[in-house]
Image: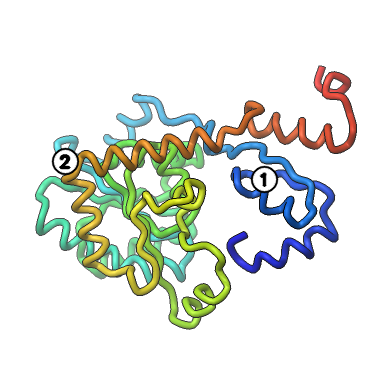
């Protein structure tokens, strides 16, 4: 639906039934004659960290609780980080000049944490790094969502992280920039105007998003500053995030159970015969 929608015609030749995670995907695939069910997205039922985990995160990261936290998410791919982190660092510098009560934290997946650490060290900018390799998988996940929950705003590279931030109720500004050749390809073949799943699900651009040539330090700085100073703007975003998370729950309970029911129906089994 976003990239080469014509591929759905090919999928129809090989797939009998599809389980979708996003509410608009079923209508899209059904247009191509593919039988499918929306089963809900697991993020909608993700258990958020408890207060003990949040307090542990604050202690581990030595956060100043009198300051507002800004989560910085430059992406999970090396190519994204190389493009986005320098822009985000410049935004951080401008924000520090305007606000004296901010702390910045980057949650760094293990495969890119050294790259991020090296870049931050080279830039000599005061940013704390939550490095995945220093914790167990469960600890890192809990601490990452603790960060999201504590953050006044997140500055993120566009991607699936927008749904994670929405689940945590974190106001966000998203952006994306890449090499000019890939940008031309994306502009030519991508069928959606937004890369933010929240905006796509809602059908309107309620989350500030700056793509390609609009991804500038001044645009990102202005949008984050507005979220830090305009409570009405912030509350509007939180409201639309809540709306999206509710839409992702689906109508049949947990996504795993909904998926099982969908497959049973497709195979013409009675649920009562299987799920006893």
Return the mark for residue 20.
Answer: 1
> Which residue ends up furthest to the bottom in the rendered image?
181
Q: Is residue 131 left or right of 20 when viewed as pictured?
A: left
Q: Position of residue 111 (x, y in %)?
A: 49, 59
Which percent across, then down, holds residue 46? Answer: 51, 33
Asked whether 140 or 96 is in front, the reply is: 96
Residue 183, above or below 236: below
Residue 29's tag is none
Q: Residue 206: x and y, percent?
A: 37, 49
Q: Secondary structure at mark 2?
A: loop
Quadrant housing the N terminus: bottom right
Q: Residue at x 37, y 29 (%)?
A: 53
Say whether residue 21 is left or right of residue 48. Answer: right
- Near mark 1 (Cα within 10 A), the count class, few <14, some 14-19 or many ≥20, is some
Q: Quadrant of residue 211?
A: bottom left
Where residue 40 appears, as percent x and y from the top left, is: 61, 37
Mark 1 falls on what kind of element? strand
State the scheme by which the image is colored.
rainbow
Distance of label 2 from label 1 (alpha carbons): 40 Å
Give the residue number, with chain letter if any, for mark 2. Answer: 67
Q: Earlier in the sequence, mark 2 or mark 1?
A: 1
Q: Residues within 10 Å of mark 2 (few under 14, many from 20)?
A: few
């Amino acid at each position: 639906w976003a990239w080469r929608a014509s591929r759905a015609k090919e999928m129809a030749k090989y797939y009998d039934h599809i389980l979708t995670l996003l509410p608009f995907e079923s209508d899209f695939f059904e247009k191509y004659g593919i039988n499918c069910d929306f089963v809900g997205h697991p993020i909608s039922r993700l258990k958020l960290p408890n207060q003990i985990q949040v307090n542990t995160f604050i202690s581990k990261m030595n956060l100043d609780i009198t300051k507002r936290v800004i989560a910085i998410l430059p992406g999970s791919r090396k190519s994204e980080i190389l493009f986005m982190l320098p822009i985000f660092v410049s935004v951080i510098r401008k924000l520090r000049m305007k606000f004296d009560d901010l702390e910045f934290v980057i949650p760094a997946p293990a495969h890119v944490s050294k790259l991020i650490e090296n870049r931050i060290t080279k830039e000599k900018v005061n940013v704390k790094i939550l490095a995945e390799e220093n914790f167990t998988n469960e600890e890192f996940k809990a601490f990452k969502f603790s960060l999201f929950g504590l953050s006044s705003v997140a500055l993120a590279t566009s991607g699936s992280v927008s749904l994670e931030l929405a689940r945590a109720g974190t106001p966000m500004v998203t952006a994306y920039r890449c090499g000019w050749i890939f940008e031309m390809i994306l502009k030519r073949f991508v069928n959606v105007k937004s890369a933010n799943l929240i905006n796509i699900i809602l059908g309107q651009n309620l989350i500030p998003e700056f793509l390609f040539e609009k991804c500038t330090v001044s645009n990102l700085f202005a949008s984050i500053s507005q979220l830090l100073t305009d409570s009405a703007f912030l509350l509007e975003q939180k409201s639309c995030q809540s709306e999206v998370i509710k839409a992702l729950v689906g109508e049949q309970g947990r996504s795993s159970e909904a998926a099982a029911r969908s497959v049973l129906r497709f195979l013409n089994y009675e649920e009562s015969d299987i799920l006893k």
